[in-house]
Amino acid sequence: MDSGQNSLRYFAEGLLNFIYPPRCLACSKLLEDNAGLCGQCFEEIRIIVDPYCQRCGMPLDPPEAFKGIETPLCADCRNHRRPFALARSIGRYEGVLKKCIHLFKYKGRKVILKPIDKLISLYFPGLFPVEKISFIVPVPLHRKRLREREFNQSELVADMIGSKYGIPVLADILSRTVYTSPQVALTRDERAENVKGAFKAGESSWLPKSNILLVDDVYTTGATACECARVLKQAGAESVYIFTLAHDV
Ligand SMILES: [Zn+2]
Ligand SMILES: [Zn+2]
């Protein structure tokens, strides 16, 4: 972009901000900068802190019950084998974070990437052995859903992490070959059944012995994460880490 185009862009942005001043996406308060969220709403995001399940990252309540346990696990992870090495999320899927994810996913409000960028910088390095990650794979959308939404929210987050930490993003390695119904209204068993066989890993020389970071928006029952991890491991991956913005408790 040349300087003429740049100044035109700044002028257009300034005009837009004058007509529609930026507001906090959660509480509608006027913002001085276009940060997406005001400071107060950003602070309200409930970050997941210890104790949480060392396998799937679910916050463990009440915390007192898990005091002194070296590797606390949730009941699900005690009773089921997980195909992934570990899953971690930044915050609880509620309040401000839930609202942000909804606006991002269903309304295409990309300004929400600004607070997400801030959350990733603050918390991501503490959640994963970043230096061990070979490459990043976003959970793919079926091409029909991609046409409806116009973008894959997980891919935008994957790209953000990739450029921040210098890790390649391989979005084409995994594809969604079955158009599944939305998971929201389904029970745990129905979710697992719904995504069974829905993903396919392509052949790639990157896959053998790799440690993959799979990126999705919300971890609910882990059905999608488990199915993707299973397919990636079957295709040769050594281990799969799961990163989601939020964990639905
Ligand atoms: Zn606010
Ligand atoms: Zn767990």
Image: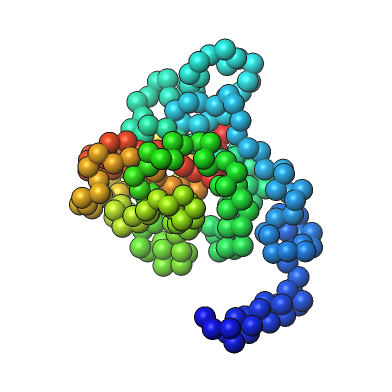
Quadrant showing the C terminus: top right
Q: Residue furthest front?
A: 3
Residue 177, image x, y percentages: 29, 55
Residue depicted at x 63% and y 84%? 8
Residue depicted at x 46% and y 49%? 165
- Residues 155 and 149: in front is 155
182 is higher (above) or lower (below) than 50: below
Left or right of 134, for residue 119: right
Residue depicted at x 61% and y 23%? 61
- Residues 144 and 8: in front is 8
Left or right of 204, for residue 180: right
Residue 124, image x, y percentages: 53, 42
Residue 172, image x, y percentages: 31, 57
- Number of marks: 0
Residue depicted at x 37% and y 32%? 85
Quadrant of the image occupied by residue 141: bottom left
Left or right of 50, for residue 29: right
101 is higher (above) or lower (below) than 54: below
Please name the colour scheme applied to the rendered image. rainbow
40 is higher (above) or lower (below) than 78: below
Residue 123, image x, y percentages: 57, 41
Q: Does residue 136 appear anywhere in the picture?
A: yes
Q: Residue furthest top?
A: 68
Quadrant of the image occupied by residue 224: top left
